[in-house]
Image (cartoon, rainbow, N blue to C red):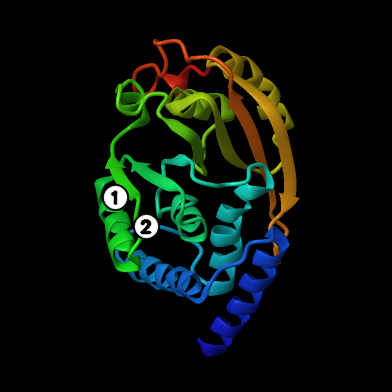
Amino acid sequence: MKDGRNQGSIDFKEGLEELNIKLNDLQIRQFMNYYELLIEKNKVMNLTAITELSEVISKHFIDSLSIIKVHHLQKEKILDLGSGAGLPGIPIKIAFPDTQVVLMDSLNKRVRFLDEVIEKLGLNNITTIHGRAEDYGKDKNYREAFDICTSRAVAKLSTLSEYCMPFVKVGGKFIPYKSGNITEELNEAESAINILGGKRLKTEEFKLPNTDISRTLILIEKCKNTPIKYPRVAGKPSKEPL
């Protein structure tokens, strides 16, 4: 384990340098404690198929932080939709403590895990919501209330846009994480993005450090209010994409 941890520390340092992110000793400890909590809880519930420290660092932590390739984070209010094990929201919060982060997930036991992580890492200005995008996207307390909505959730971009765009305020950004070649998916989603009030500004393709995994980040600006009928009722966005 010691050798694995040493290699993990080297991989983490290299990945952070590539992103030009500097972390202090407390932040590094928070990441390592997060890793330990994740692996321990993963023994009793399905949070991640990736458990080796070096892989968690590259495929979860550095991947999450790569959001800065398309947007420099400052004091924004960020929604991580379909947060799962807390990715990308918790790494973003640790590395950029001035952000205000909300983690939303539809499974209550995952939300309880996220609450435990937040408490044990001593993180501030980060909260959780147990709920679905279709419901909270129409709630006046959350609709168009965020500077950034991001998600690593596995869904077609047209569907994911309908879930996420209603939460973004005009002038804010929707930043989805996608894998592999997404040219066709991106073309299919252009109409949905436009209908929902968005405009694609940038697409950033890269490989995760120490892997052969292709990753794409998409920067979408919210140019106008999302029509009130979106998001549609549960199931509709995935069964009948815009």
Q: Residues within 10 Å of mark 2 (few under 14, many from 20)?
A: few
Q: Nearer the viewer, residue 6 or 119?
A: 119
Residue 211, how many percent across, how many down? 70, 62
State which tag comes first along the sequence, 2 or 1.
2
Residue 200: numbered disc: none
Residue 194, how many percent across, how many down? 60, 15
**Quadrant of the rendered structure where residue 118 is?**
bottom left
Figure check: 61 above or below 186: below
Q: What residue appears at the point 39 percent right and 10 percent down from the top-left corner?
A: 229
**Left of 50 or right of it: where is 180?**
right
**Quadrant of the rendered structure where residue 17 is?**
bottom right
Residue 46: numbered disc: 2
Residue 144, how many percent across, how many down? 42, 24
Question: Of all residues shown, which one is farthest toward the bottom?
Answer: 2
Figure check: 129 above or below 37: above
Residue 111: numbered disc: 1
**Left of 41 or right of it: where is 79?**
right
Q: What residue appears at the point 44 percent right and 23 percent down from the top-left corner?
A: 166
**Left of 22 or right of it: where is 231?**
left
Q: Nearer the viewer, residue 23 or 66?
A: 23
Residue 43 in view of the camera: no
Residue 173, how many percent across, how many down? 56, 31
Q: Secondary structure at mark 2?
A: loop
Figure check: 140 above or below 115: above
Q: Residues within 10 Å of mark 1 (few under 14, many from 20)?
A: many
Q: What residue appears at the point 62 percent right and 41 percent down from the top-left corner?
A: 178
Under mark 2, the amino acid is Asn
Gap in Å between the C-alphas at discs 2 and 1?
13 Å
Q: Secondary structure at mark 1?
A: helix
**Quadrant of the rendered structure where residue 119 is?**
bottom left
Q: Nearer the viewer, residue 73 or 34?
A: 73
